[in-house]
Image (spheres, rainbow, N blue to C red):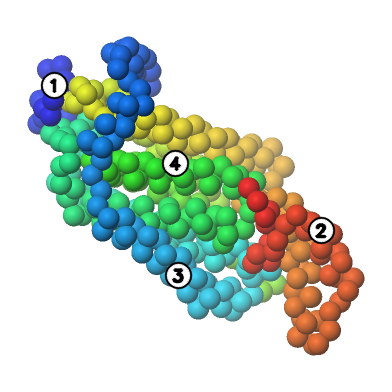
Amino acid sequence: MDSHTGDDMSVGEVEPMPGYADLITRASTVMPSALRGCSTCGLELSKSTLLDNAYITWTEIGLFFICAVMWTQIRRGLTECLFQPFAQWCSLQPKDSAKMPESSWKLVFYTMSWSYSTYLLFFTNYTFFHDPPSVFYEWKRGMTVPTDIAIAYLIQGSFYGHSIYATVYMDAWRKDSTVMVVHHVITLALITFSYAFRFHNIGLLVLFLHDINDIQLEFTKLNVYFKTRGGGYYLINDILSNMGSVSFSITWFWFRLYWFPLKVLYATCVSSLQSVPNIPFYFFFNSLLLTLLCMNIYWFLYIVAFVAKVLTGQMKDVKDLREYEGEEGAQRAATLLKAQQQSKDAGHLNNSAETQLNNSTEGKHLQNGITKEKHL
């Protein structure tokens, strides 16, 4: 059960990466066969499988919550002591100054996390990227998770725990924020259960394939914010934002829509059953991964829409596709909020501005100068 049993393949050999046709053909054959063979599947079997295969300690759970709170506090500290003062020093436009700390924080984190994943996959003895089926070689229930991979899981798991809270209460609300919350929940579920069931090898590969796009996205957005500041226009930031946008579009397809299904999904749908015929929660994990793929396709539609607008001249420059709901209302609210704060400092309140602000943000609250829905 714990040995690799693929056709004419040994542990030392590297299986060629399949194509889309191979993935669809093999998965459509293997998965229905696995479902038919699971004649005793049900709630009771799932419960017993969970108890028999899930290994996670209270210490690890405690570290998760401690680190999640730590990320929240680090973000607040960096925002108050570094990001906001720097945005003010650069004289960013009010709407850009409100967005800049969020993008700066995400750029710092994702650069750190992706660099660590890259180190593990390409500068150690792990062969998971070049030989994805190897993620299930010698899999054993309750096997020890290598310390370096356990650290990667703690960093990423606690960050996504923080991100669920941050999306609702710290980040400005956007058109796809609801989808983003769902994404964070699914990602956290994948991280938690893959660690508990010792599918940490494939989890490391999933994290590597997704984090690079977040680096490029936040880098591009920051250059969009900085290209118009202090009443001037900066060509270098405009060029960097356009370069980042092109790079982001290409790598999104390459990493999330090419490598992710052909390396990760093929390994989890097909290769996993070759190495571990009775692998626990086969359908549960593959369902989460397929949902993640669907969300990647959903966001890719935003990218396609962006490219189409640029090519047809509907958009003259790069901007954030995940715009805030009611962008004009958000900008107006930011202006009015600033006027309201100034009048409070002077000892009086501009009643007309307050009335207009209340009318324009009915059912919303202001956060960082940007309107945000109170509920999902």
- Label 1 or label 4, whichever lies nearer to me, is 4
Q: Which residue is mark 1?
A: 5
Q: Which residue is mark 3?
A: 73
Q: Position of residue 196 (x, y in %)?
A: 27, 43
For the residue pair 44 and 41, the one nearer the viewer reads as 44
| Above-or-below relation of 116 to 10 | below
Q: Which quarter of the figure is the N terminus placed in? A: top left
For residue 259, the mark is none
Residue type at tag 1? Thr
Spatial CA span between label 1 and label 4: 31 Å
Going from the N terminus, do you reach mark 1 or mark 4 first? 1
Judge whether residue 235 can be spotted in this image. no
For the residue pair 302 and 229, the one nearer the viewer reads as 302
Would you call the spot at circle 1 few (<14 residues within 10 Å), some (14-19), or many (20 or more)?
some
For residue 186, the mark is 4
Q: Which residue is mark 2?
A: 360
Would you call the spot at circle 4 few (<14 residues within 10 Å), some (14-19), or many (20 or more)?
some
Q: Position of residue 19 (x, y in %)?
A: 34, 22
Residue at the outermost front position: 44
